[in-house]
Image: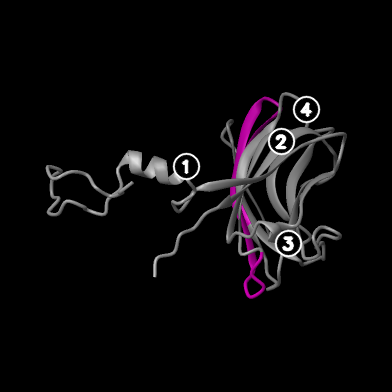
Amino acid sequence: MAYGYLGQNTPNQTVNNSGVFSITDSANLQSQGKLGGSLELIEEQTVSGTPSSIDFINLANNPYDVYLVQMSNFIASSQTQVIFRFSNDNGTTFEAGSSAYQFASQRMITNGGFAESRSTGTTYIGTDVYTNTSTSNLNGYFYLYNLLDSSKYSFLTQQLSAILGANGRTSFGGGVYPTAETINAFQILAQVSTWTSGTAKLYGVKQIWVT
């Protein structure tokens, strides 16, 4: 199938093939995983029991420059912040040194409150979003960058929402692991509690480079 052809009567088109994809072209290419930004589902985990973390390991088996994780309906046994940590040994241990990470996030609350949470050196990448009971389930997503590249720092950006008490709250922000090494696993932690339910889906973000 030829792509990028919009027809001779399209305004401002001077040749038969403009190189512009139609909506149908884009949908077809994305469904085949041949368009930049296409997602490949790598792994889905659903909370079982009461773990303190959900761990995604062996990332090198599915190498991507960028990963996306969707979090759906996460609930903890008691009020807790969602935090993240990285691993350089496939999840045997997770980096938790006193200045292993830097992060900054902005929190907005539906009652009008605003706050920021940040650190230039701490044991995790924080979010300032909390969850605890079945009525305060947490949802959102985060992106991961450069994890498998040993010459670059590893970055995370996030946007998460939950209800705590009577008010909704949303956080957006990001963090960095400022050590250039291969990161091949990461975890989603309930900072001071355990998870009782929730589903996390890990995707690879396909990128197409034109040279």
- Along the viewing direction, whichever of 33 and 122 lies nearer the viewer: 33
* Chain-order first, disc 1 or disc 4: 1
Instruction: Report the Cα–Cα distance between label 4 and label 3.
Output: 32 Å
Amino acid carrying mark 1 in the image:
Ser
Colour mode of the rendering: one colour
Residue visible at 34% across and 38% down in the picture = 24
Figure check: 66 above or below 9: below
Residue at the front extreme, as displayed = 1
Inspect the image, locate mark 2, and give the three-letter code of the amino acid beneath it: Thr
Q: Write down the residue under mark 2.
A: 199
Q: Can residue 82 be seen in this view?
A: yes
Q: How crowded is mark 2: few (under 14 residues within 10 Å), some or many (20 or more)?
A: some
Q: Quadrant of residue 153?
A: bottom right
- Amino acid at pointer 4: Thr
Q: Nearer the viewer, mark 1 or mark 4?
A: 1
Lower sequence index among marks 4 and 3:
4
Q: Work out whether mark 1 precedes mark 3 in sequence or the reverse, and give the earlier one.
A: 1
Image quadrant in which the C terminus is located: bottom left
- Where's residue 92, x and y in %? 86, 59
What is the secondary structure assignment of the residue under circle 3? loop
Q: For mark 1, does the 10 Å Cα neighbourhood hold few (<14), some (14 to 19), or many (20 or more) residues?
A: few
Measured as percent of width and height from the top left, residue 54 is found at 78, 45
Q: Mark 4 points at which residue?
A: 133
Whether 151 is drawn above or below 84: the answer is below
Which residues, given as a range, are shown in magenta?
148-174
Among the two numbered marks 4 and 2 on one chain, the one whose residue lies closer to the N terminus: 4
According to the image, label 3 marks what residue? 184
Q: Mark 1 points at which residue?
A: 31
